[in-house]
Image (cartoon, grey):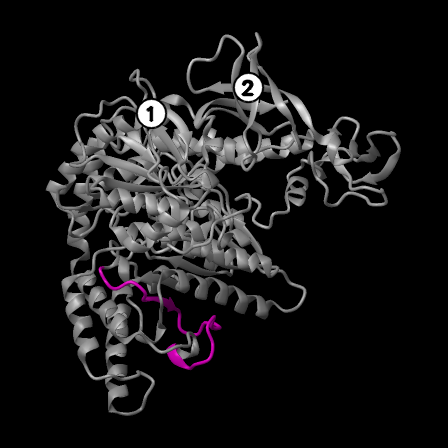
Amino acid sequence: MKERIYLDHAATAPLRAEVVAAMTAALRGPAGNASSVHAAGRAARAAVEAARREVAALLGVAGEEIVFTSGGTEGNNLVVRGLARSAAARLGPGARPHVVSSPLEHPSVLGALAVLASEGLDVSYVAVDANGRVTPAALRAALRPETVLVTLAAANHELGNESDVAALAAVARAGGALFHTDAVQSAPWRALEVGAAGVDAETISAHKLGGPQGVGAVFVRRGLDLPPLVVGGHQEYERRAGTENVAGIVGFGTAARLVATERADTAARIGELRDRLAARLLQVPDARVHGDVAARVPGTLNVAFAGAPGPLVAIALDLVGVCVATGAACTSGSLAPSAVLLALGLDDRAAGEALRFSLGRDTTAAEIERVAALVPELVARVRGGASRAGVRPARERIVVAMSGGVDSSTAAALLVEQGYDVVGATLKLYDASGTSAAVGRCCGPRDIADARATAAAFGFPHYVIDESAAFAADVIDEFVAEHRLGRTPNPCVRCNEKLKFGPLLAFADAIGATALATGHYARLLPSASGGPPTLARAAAVDKDQSYFLFGVRPAWLARARFPLGDKTKDEVRAHARRLGVPNADKPESQEICFIPDGDHKAFVEAHGGAGNRGVVVDDASGAVVSAHAGTHRFTIGQRRGLPGGAAERRFVLRIDAATGTVHVGPRERLGRDSVRVSDVRWLSAPPRERLRCAVQIRHHATPAGAWLEPGADGCVDVRLDEPALGVAPGQAAVFYDADNVLGGGWIV
């Protein structure tokens, strides 16, 4: 791999050498708290105040108008929430203060506005045009007599669009409102004399300037009332409590001083490189640029290639040494498409194709030429129209599907040990925010964090791929619909069939990988005829997961690897501990991933899947036992939760979803010796005549001897040697020849 090319300066700029030197000197100097009155404290205070003057000079304001924060996010929250609350208090009781912003703002601003709205303030968003421009006329139309604050960015974090801050601030002030601007993205490129512009508050962040992460500042015009968000100390003019980060602030001041002297020359040079890159990328078929090309900061280029998802192109670039982004770093991993691009009128697909190239002062012409040469080939590969020649990894590359559990983590670690070029990928399938799935449930945020930790420990890249829309349509919606029909679905089988392999193999193709490995306990046996491998049970029968994989296409299985198929769970744990896998002792997840509390009844009801209300009847006599609140609350074979009073235990025997009738009876009436299976998938040639095999109707069920009789309609009639208990429509029936999976389908 060539030396890494960094084109993500809008997320963070590299730390400048001069800043490192200044911070090192501060860290190595005598200890001192800037609030202490002794000599060491006074020295720390002097360093903070010197940096404050340097930051103030960058903005053209007085030092006393600068409040140091931990960065842009805190600064935006402090100013937006603080100024709005302060103004609201002045309006008096009964008034409803109004705040105006735009849908293009940084998530930290939008988040602060959401808090204000939850507190009763009225928040509205001024319309933008197709290029993302907010005009003074549009702002003027959005103002009301009760408008107390306008907050609009000086430059957009994704598009690079520059606002006419002076004109917008003049409109706000004429309407009697305060004006705040988020200048985090504009400060490295443009001088904004906030005093002359009529700005009341401004946010900046050190790490966009080549300073350290974790420190920022807000300008607050002298005389404004700004209550603190953090209390318990008198620091920062009693506007932000907490011991100052002296070394970070020193680094911030150094970066501010350097930017102030170099900004104009750097902007001119980088703007030319940005335009050169744009011209080359627009030569790619069906390429387009987003944003206002006539007014944008010099370093930012937001571009898209139709038919090539932006995240896949960004990952492909990353794997050949080029760092770019698909949106704001603060929304990395978000399920939703870019709110900025949606506000421009793009649909979800088009918004998902965007890439952000952001150049900085260290970007060179040679780097731009290298990137411009790489992108067309990688876009073609992501689109599926390129051969696997060209940009290829030095070692065989394998994508590992990482759920965050010990099994997939160990599979990845074993492949690293064997010398493969491993790339980890986690499918983000649903939004677990605010639920117990955030900790300790399959595919939740904690699991993504665990997968990342494993990747970091073993030094391979890890990416999160958003398949939430497909998961909702193919798994969740079907789960709800099946319960509404009185059936018993298996979402894990559907997820493997429709999501776990297809999207990840497409991802593998996009990044030049040859195979996909998972942590499943199953085996793939080579075919004697040279055809696709045979799916077989794992060596550890108690952990076997081949039941869940019968629906995976043979062509996909031919490119799959199951590194754990010949191992027991204890052996996997032992390998995990030997290799130092971070989550070696993590408990196994048991619940359905998208129902973390296990209450599928409440979930189905919340998603509009409640079945018909009706009665529970005794199957033998037809007598009504009780009323019930919906057929979705029952499954075949269920005993718990049924009304009592009978001499023997009752079980659900069948469900008539149309009438809402649930039939119950004794356990022996559960048995079925014949089953019809539809939507059958064969992993090899389908049989033309009666076939002897074993059939498994639940994951933990014992396979039962049976005869299969293929029907002309594609269904299969299963004749079991012995009656099976609890056979439910909607369950998967999987056919085995000894350990080998022949195929399977769905019980009707």
Name the residue rendered at 24%, 44% in the picture: 416
Q: What amino acid type is highlighted by mark number 1?
A: Ala
Q: Quadrant of residue 218?
A: bottom left
Q: Secondary structure at mark 1?
A: loop
| Magenta residues, dominant SS class | loop
Dot 1 crowding, Cα within 10 Å, few <14, some 14–19, many 20+: some
357 left or right of 17 in image: right
- Residue 156 visible in rendering: no
Q: Secondary structure at mark 2?
A: strand
Q: What amino acid type is highlighted by mark number 2?
A: Asp
The C terminus lies in which quarter of the figure? top right
Q: Which residue has dot 1 on it?
A: 558
Q: Residue 536's x, y, as percent?
A: 41, 29
Q: Quadrant of residue 485?
A: top right
269 left or right of 339 in image: left
- Please name whichever residue, 480 or 661, is drawn nearer the observer in this view of the structure: 661
